[in-house]
Amino acid sequence: MSEDPSLQDFRLRVAKFLAAAKSTNDTCPAYGAILPPHLHSKAMHWQRYCYDHGWAGVHWPQEHGGMGLSRAHNVVWHEECALADIAPYLNLQGLVLAGEAILRSGTKEQKERFLRATLSNEILWCQLFSEPGAGSDLAGLKTSAVLDGDHFILNGQKVWSSNAQFAQFGILMARTDTTLPKHKGITFFLLDMHTKGIEVRPIKQMTGDSEFCEVFFSDVVVPSSAVLGDLNQGWSVAMAVLEDERGGAGAAGVINLRRRLEQMSAGAGSIDTLTSDELTKILNRGRALQALMEFRGTDPQVAPIAKLMNSELGYDEAQVDAMLRGADAMLESDATEGLLYAPGMKIAGGSSEIQRNIIGERVLGLPREPQSSE
Ligand SMILES: Cc1cc2nc3c(=O)[nH]c(=O)nc-3n(C[C@H](O)[C@H](O)[C@H](O)COP(=O)(O)OP(=O)(O)OC[C@H]3O[C@@H](n4cnc5c(N)ncnc54)[C@H](O)[C@@H]3O)c2cc1C
């Protein structure tokens, strides 16, 4: 795109592009935060299609394959995708978490190696943060990367790594100095998932799908060039990534919500007063979230509030949907899947309890909860 279009003009262009791509069946339906395996090939195709047509990475630099526009243009892209029920990108782990981290902290070489390849779908990313003993208490992670000459030797285990079975690269946190306090001595890596010594085991969920995996590392040789940011400074790189993850709920999420609620009420036939009341409450909570994002969306303190509101909304929406479907929700329908998937929303990206702790301590300035060890 040769000049920066006004937001209004850009909105019209986006709507036109999306409508044309949808009519030729090149798009992928909106799916929320985690790419489900059954949409994998459709999402891969859609990402490549956007890249080939000059519509990938709205606010990423043009030299790395993006459109070079502003973050406000990117919000418009997300809103128009939501209105059209189309996924805004291939996956959150790559196009938001890894991509933004590399844009912020990457070397020139890392930007050249990864950004364009992420936009064009040659690299699909996964997030290798959580471990069996380190989820909410992420700083307690034990996976170790020991420096040995010009490379590291990686050993340990990650869990709940979404899309790891498909990923070419992962953003990884590993302990590189055991003598430092637990928030220090952690380094952030861009890990090639095809390196010898990495074993990925998909986990079967109660929905029947396998969206996430266990990942085991046995003496994996990782080059020093894979470090993002500085050695032992991975905690601050990761905190910015988690802020991106929490801050994902915006106006686009509410447009998606409104569309789903309309579908729910349209498909329900006659709705009693109680159910109509529940639908209205959810819609109003969605509107409150939308207003919050419009007025304070760029404030980092809002990120945990938006994450909490969004996850709780998603969970309650699935309950109301199940109530509307009655016995159907107990059978094999999309309502069953929604109901079984819903609890995960209150855990993924940091649980609701942890968001409440963050809001209490960092937004409201309440005393910190006691820590067993620092
Ligand atoms: C659908 C899904 C996708 C995910 N994808 C990824 C991924 O791609 N990559 C990745 O690295 N991780 C991923 N995760 C993992 C996720 O980040 C963790 O599950 C989450 O951070 C919670 O950690 P945990 O499961 O170890 O639970 P724990 O930390 O063991 O918590 C167990 C329970 O205790 C509560 N709790 C813990 N500490 C406190 C406290 N201090 N105060 C109050 N309550 C507390 C929690 O809220 C929770 O209810 C995913 C999870 C889900 C559900």
Image: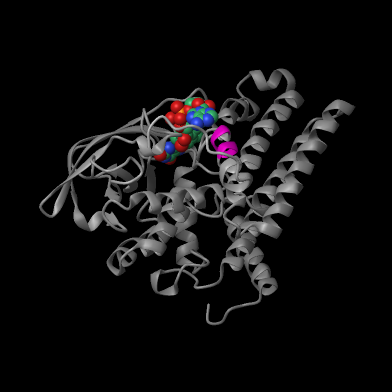
* 174 and 23: which is toward the camera: 174
Q: In this view, does 26 lie to the left or right of 272?
A: left
Secondary structure mostly seen in magenta is helix
Quarter occupied by residue 251: bottom right
Residue at point 35%, 56% (across, down): 122
Question: How far across and how far down the image is residue 365, in percent?
Answer: 60, 45
Q: From what the image shows, is residue 122 above or below residue 345?
A: below
What's the magenta region?
Answer: 353-357
On screen, residue 232 above or below 216 = below
Q: Count every numbered label the image shows and give the total.
A: 0
Residue 37 lies left or right of residue 326; in this view the side is: left
Q: Quadrant of the C terminus?
A: top left
Q: Does residue 250 lie above or below 138 as drawn?
A: below
Farthest right residue in view: 273
Where is residue 186 shown, x and y percent of the image? 30, 46
Viewer-nearest residue: 8 or 226:
226
Q: Which of 23 and 1 is in front in this view?
A: 1
Q: Is residue 47 magenta?
A: no
